[in-house]
Image: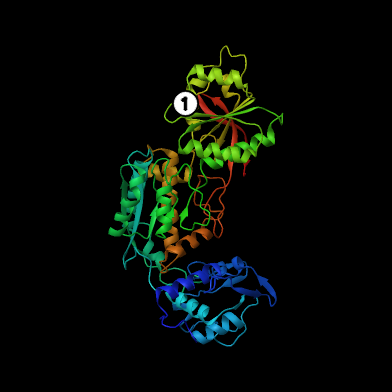
Amino acid sequence: MAAAAGQSAGSSDLVDAGRRLYRAAEGSEGTSIEATTQHDVRLAAASAACIGCHRRSGLGGSEGPVRSPPVTGAALFSSRETPPRRPAYNDASLRRAVTQGIGADGRTLDALMPRYRLTDDDLAALAAYLRTLGAEPSPGVASTAIELATIVTDDAAESDVVVEVLRRFTEIKNAGTRNETRRAAAAQHPYGERRDRAFRRWHLSVWRLEGPASTWDSQLSALYDRHPPFAVVSGATGHDWLVVHRFCEQRELPCILPIADAPPGTGGDFYSLYFSEGVRLEARAAARHIAATADDPAARVLLVYGDDERGRAAGDAFVNAWRGRPLVQRRIAAGTRPTRRQWQEMVSREQPDILVAWLTPWQLQTLSSIVSGMPWLPRRIYTAEGFAPWLEAGSPAPFLDRVHHVYPYTLPAANRSRFPREQTWLRGQGLDDLNAVAAAKVLFACHVVGEALADIQGNFYRDYLLEELEHMLDGTSMTSLYPTTALGPGQRRLVSGSYVVRLGRSNQVATYNDPDWIAP
């Protein structure tokens, strides 16, 4: 094959060109690769990329009855001794496979396999890149242990919960009480070329960031260079996760289910998996609920939110979902709350039919105090769990009757724990005094990583960990936190809906009435 002159198959330039071809169907000249499938169906570049079927890891996958085999170097360029048997690919047979659809054994490949129009340089680059796939385990993996990290800050309310639950789970995991060694010898994996399910001890590092967020990237780089982990599990940095998100994407480091009130938009990002869009989801659910249920389409809406990252994220999400309809906005200075007089002036001046208050219980206290003597009260008041947890609801009856609360978790059944699966474990470990929501989230992240590491067997590749989670967490019953979960290829939000409930009182405890599930 006439490969690019002066470049060895393993050179970085050639591998980079192969990566672009594999992931984006971009040829060596910067143009989109042409391809056809089903004999004569032309594919756009995004649809033609190898990553669509063989996945980012190269370990393949399946959708319904269609299976895409692994194309890692170890799988492709060696013979397969198990049915269907075939000889090893070489550069010539790889060219024939991707351009003509004929396999190394001479058989015609499935019609769904695209036939590409590639130059010699393209083929050389693709072969070079495929040889790097699966060549070495990802950083953080040793023969008997695996490095994991969590990321916290001292000013994050959930940091102690994250560390306590993770450390206890790691102790139990490493004690071998869950029969990992026996499970390691269990069933074979459907795609991966490595078949061992060898148990790895967890080595957990707590990365505690200090100072302003502008210094976090350098701190993260130093911690990573010292002990690069295979993945980040959970974590909490208050309301500012963007620095961590960008760092993990740049280092291609999986970050699994951190506690983040307003996760950044992922766009095409791959390595960060979140529970949901947080307060953005709650804001969009409220906007959708108002639009669907308001008696008067011209109802006056007043949106009040704090001028901080979390408040602005929810405020912007509500405005975008409200789609240009009349809306009055009021920002509250970060760390302050409206006085009784300010509330009276706002409500009297705007006379809102609907008040949307993305505020904390502390900030809402003065709102409650204006009930008596006011000639005008909103017919509805929207609050959200991301700002004012329902257990802390303290509104007097005249307001409570008007409250619609956005609640993203499973509604608790009468006389039962809020999250029975997680809280049973926490009670058994003497950790039931921790914040229930935060502890349940950390424990779920631990279970997710533990099960995924077992299922990927010996294929310790960061990309493959995320791909395994896409299969494992779609409709999972592994958690009682959420009523439903959904995750598919490329998706990085586990939950896409929320309840909107009417709050009531029963024996001085907030209760739910008339729940509506909203998936905006």
489 up-or-down from 108: above or below: above
**Residue 391, image x and y in percent?**
48, 31
> Between residues 377 and 512, which one lies in front from this camera angle?
377
Image quadrant where one finds the C terminus? top right
**Residue 110, image x and y in percent?**
63, 78
Q: How is the image coloured?
A: rainbow
399 up-or-down from 520: above or below: above
Count of numbered badges drawn on the protein: 1
Circle 1 SS class: helix
Quarter occupied by residue 465: bottom left
In this orientation, does residue 89 appear? no
> Between residues 452 and 319, which one lies in front from this camera angle?
319
89 up-or-down from 112: above or below: below
302 up-or-down from 21: above or below: above
Position of 297 with respect to 130 (left or right) is right
Quarter occupied by residue 397: top right
Amino acid tagged 1: Gln
Residue ID at (45%, 64%): 463
Which residue is labeled 1 in the image? 363
Circle 1 residues within 10 Å: few <14, some 14–19, many ≥20? many
Position of 56 with respect to 150 (left or right) is right
**Residue 359, image x and y in percent?**
49, 30
Residue ID at (41%, 64%): 183
In this orientation, does residue 423 appear? yes
Q: Residue furthest top?
A: 373
**Residue 215, image x and y in percent?**
33, 47
> Between residues 341 and 151, which one lies in front from this camera angle?
341
> Between residues 193 and 21, which one lies in front from this camera angle?
21
Quarter occupied by residue 335: top left
